[in-house]
Amino acid sequence: MNDTLKVIKNRRAIRKYKAEQISAAELQEILDCAVYAPNARNQQKWHFTVIQSKAMLDKMVGIIRENINNSGNEFLKQRAASPDYHTFYHAPTVILISADEKAPWIHVDCGLAAENITLAAEAQNIGSCVIASSGLLFASEKGNAMRKELGMPEGYNHVCTIALGYKDENPAPPPRSKEVINYVR
C-alpha cells in the first residue's frame, strides 16, 4: 500500500494530546496543505485562524461551556458538566476554519481543507480531531465579540475547528460499514 493510502487509513480522531506544542515547521506544512485543498472556482473564501495561546483556548472553552449550558441540548450539557471537559481535548494547537457564507459550495471547500489538515497532520504523526461543536462559541454576544480578537474576517462565520497535537493515545480503528456503497454499472 502506498504512503498516501496508509495515511488515510491510519488517521483517527485523537482526543488525548501531549502538552508539548507542535513545531513551527510542522504547523506550516499543515497550513500549506490546507490552502492547497480543492475549492470551487478557486474562490478561496476560507480563513484559517491558528490558536496556540493556552489562555485564549481556555477563554474560548469557558464561553463555549457557558453557551452549552444555555443551549437546552442535554447531551452537550452532560458532556460540558464533566470536570475535565475541554472542547479541544487540551490540544496545544487549534485551527479555526471560517468562511464567507455567501460563497457557493463553501462548506464543501472547507471540508476539503479540513481533510487536508488532518491528513497532513497524520503524515507527520500529529494527532487531529475535527470539532463542529466549537461553533457554540459564537452563540452569545460574549462569544461573537471574540471574532475580532480571533482575527476572523468581516462577514466570515465559523465552519469547524481542528485540534492538533502530538498523540497521547493510539485508538483502534472503529468499524466501517461497506453497506454504504452501491454500484450502478
Image (cartoon, rainbow, N blue to C red):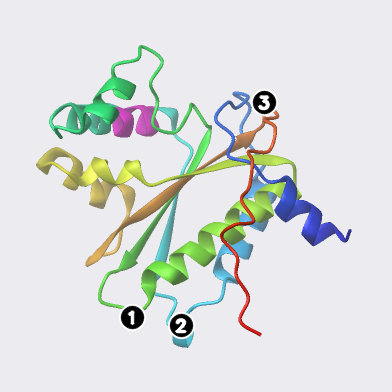
Q: Identify the image quadrant of the N terminus.
A: bottom right
Residue 18, given in percent of the width and then of the height, sits at 63, 24
Contact between marks 1 and 2 (CB within 8 A): the answer is yes
Residue 162 in the figure: left or right of residue 134? right
Residue 147 in the figure: left or right of residue 1? left
- The residue labelled by disc 1 is 104
> Is residue 39 inside the magenta stretch?
no
Residue 72 in the figure: left or right of residue 84? left
Above-or-below relation of 53 to 37: above
Measured in 3D between alpha carbons, the distance from the residue under mark 1 to the one under mark 3, in whole angstroms, is 38 Å
Marked residue nearer the N-terminal end (2 or 3):
2
Local packing at callout 2 (Cα closer than 10 Å; few below 14, some 14-19, many 20+) is few
Residue 155, given in percent of the width and then of the height, sits at 22, 67
Measured in 3D between alpha carbons, the distance from the residue under mark 1 to the one under mark 2, in whole angstroms, is 7 Å
Question: In this orientation, which residue lies closer to the viewer: 174 or 81?
Answer: 174
Under mark 1, the amino acid is Pro
> Which circle marks residue 40 in the picture?
2
Question: In this orientation, which residue lies closer to the viewer: 178 or 89?
Answer: 178
- The residue labelled by disc 3 is 169
Q: Residue at x 20, y 33 (%)?
A: 73
Residue 152, given in percent of the width and then of the height, sits at 31, 57
Q: Which residues, given as a range, are shown in magenta?
A: 55-61
Residue 150 in the figure: left or right of residue 140? right
Numbered disc 3: secondary structure? loop
